[in-house]
Image (cartoon, rainbow, N blue to C red):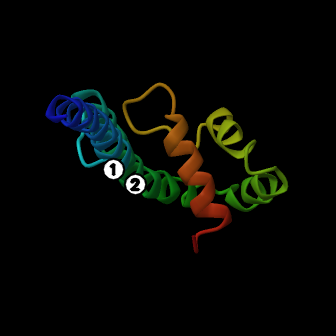
Amino acid sequence: MTKGYMKSFGWGMVVGMVVLLIVIFSTGWVVTSNSAKAMAHEISENAVVDRLAPIAVAQFMKNPNREEGLKELKKLESWQRPDYVKKQGWAIMPGEKESDYGVAKEFARLLVDPVK
C-alpha cells in the first residue's frame, strides 16, 4: 500500500514542479539572458529617441518653411508621417546621413500631437 502512495506522491511532485516552472516563467518572475538583452536594447533605444526627437523639433522650428511643412505633415495618416519626415530630412542629426525611423516617428508625434 505504501508503494502506491509513494508512486502517486512522486507523480504529484513531478506535475507540481512542471506547473510551478510554467507559472514562474510565464509571469516573468525569472528573466532569461535573451529577454534581459532585448529589454535593455529597447530601453536604450527609447532613451536615445527621447533625447534626439526634441533636438530635431528645435532644428525644424528654425526652418522658414515650417508652417507649410507642418500642414503637410498633419494631412498624412499617422503611419505615413515617419517616412515623410525622413524624406524631408527633418530628423537628421548633425553628422548623420539619414534620420532614424524611431526619431522620425517621435518627431512627427511631438509636432502633430505633443500632449501624448
Q: Identify the residue under disc 2.
A: 50
- Outermost residue toward the bottom in this view: 115
Quarter holding the C terminus is bottom right
Task: Count the marks.
Answer: 2
Residue 14 location in percent, x, y? 25, 32
Whether residue 104 appears in this view of the structure is yes
- Outermost residue toward the right in this view: 75
Q: Amino acid at mark 2?
A: Asp
Quarter holding the N terminus is top left
What distance separates the C-alpha of mark 2 from that of mark 1? 5 Å
Would residue 74 appear left or right of 112 to someone viewing this image? right
Q: Nearer the viewer, residue 61 or 71?
A: 71
- Residue at (54% x, 52% y) in the render: 106
Q: Nearer the viewer, residue 21 or 40?
A: 21
Residue 112 location in percent, x, y? 68, 63
- Residue at (62% x, 62% y) in the render: 111
- Residue at (47% x, 25% y) in the render: 97
Q: Identify the residue under disc 1.
A: 47
Whether residue 91 appears in this view of the structure is no
Query: To which quarter of the image does residue 36 belong?
Result: top left
Q: How busy is the neighbourhood of tag 1: few (under 14 within 10 Å), some, or many (20 plus)?
A: few
Dot 2: what SS?
helix
Q: Is residue 80 above or below residue 67?
A: above
Residue 47 location in percent, x, y? 33, 50
Q: Is residue 2 above or below residue 43?
A: above
Would residue 79 appear left or right of 10 to someone viewing this image? right
Q: Is residue 98 above or below residue 69?
A: above
- Mark 2–mark 1 contact, CB under 8 Å? yes
Q: Amino acid at mark 1?
A: Ala
Residue 75 tag number: none
Dot 1: what SS?
helix
